[in-house]
Image: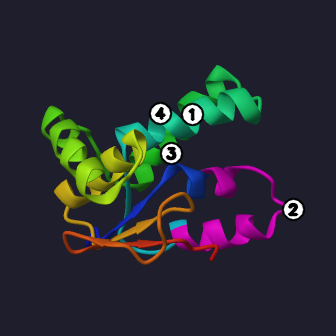
């Protein structure tokens, strides 16, 4: 499988939560594409929100993490990416966490990031940010 798109935590959360939202089906379509990946940061953000906002149990969290592990490549965030994220913040006015997502996607050779929170259409180092809900 060729990995080429990185999915941010907000898209995953729409896939897991609020099935009545129109964004739910759009998120499911995004994560069903071939080549989807995520990072350890995104796994952490998703799990934290599922615990706090969706009332997941610890058993459900463990199962969610295992499902991620079995279905998608998970990129481990490195200290080099933390440094690269700093440079990205200077150049593109990204938030701390968004810059780390972008740095991870670049290091993982992704071409697309699906995110609701970042500037739709922004291109950074061969990477394009797409808001799947725009």
The residue most toward the top is 58
Disc 3 residue crowd, few under 14, some 14–19, many 20+, Cα 10 Å: few
Q: CA distance from mark 3 to mark 1?
A: 12 Å
* Quarter in which the N terminus is drawn: bottom left
Name the disc covering residue 67, or none.
Answer: 3
Q: Which mark is residue 44?
A: 4
Nearer mark to the viewer, of 3 and 1: 1
Secondary element type, mark 4: helix
Q: Which of the two discs, 3 and 2, labels the residue nearer the N terminus?
A: 2
Give me the residue at 28% from left, 68% from top: 3
Question: Does residue 52 appear left or right of residue 109 in this picture?
Answer: right
Which sits in the foreground, 62 or 41? Answer: 41
How far apart are labels 1 and 4 at the CA level? 5 Å
- Cβ atoms under marks 1 and 4 closer than 8 Å: yes
* Label 1 secondary element: helix
- Residue 75: % across, % down: 28, 46
CA distance for labels 4 and 3? 14 Å
Residue 9 shows in this picture: yes
Query: Which label sits on residue 20?
Result: 2
Residue on which disc 1 sits: 47
Determine contact: label 4, label 3, CB under 8 Å. no
Residue at the image point whose x is 66% and y is 73% from the top: 26
The percent coordinates of residue 37 (x first, y second) are 37, 58
Q: Earlier in the sequence, mark 3 or mark 1?
A: 1
């Amino acid at each position: 499988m060729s990995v080429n798109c990185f999915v941010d935590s907000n898209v995953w959360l729409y896939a897991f939560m609020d099935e009545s939202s129109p964004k739910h089906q759009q998120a499911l379509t995004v994560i069903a594409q071939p080549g989807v990946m995520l990072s350890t940061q995104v796994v952490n953000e998703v799990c934290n929100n599922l615990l706090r906002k969706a009332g997941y149990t610890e058993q459900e969290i463990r199962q969610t993490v295992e499902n991620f592990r079995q279905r998608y490549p998970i990129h481990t965030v490195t200290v080099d990416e933390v440094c690269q994220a700093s440079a990205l913040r200077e150049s593109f006015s990204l938030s701390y966490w968004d810059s780390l997502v972008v740095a991870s996607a670049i290091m993982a050779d992704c071409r697309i990031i699906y995110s609701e929170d970042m500037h739709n259409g922004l291109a950074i180092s061969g990477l394009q940010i797409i808001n799947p809900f725009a």
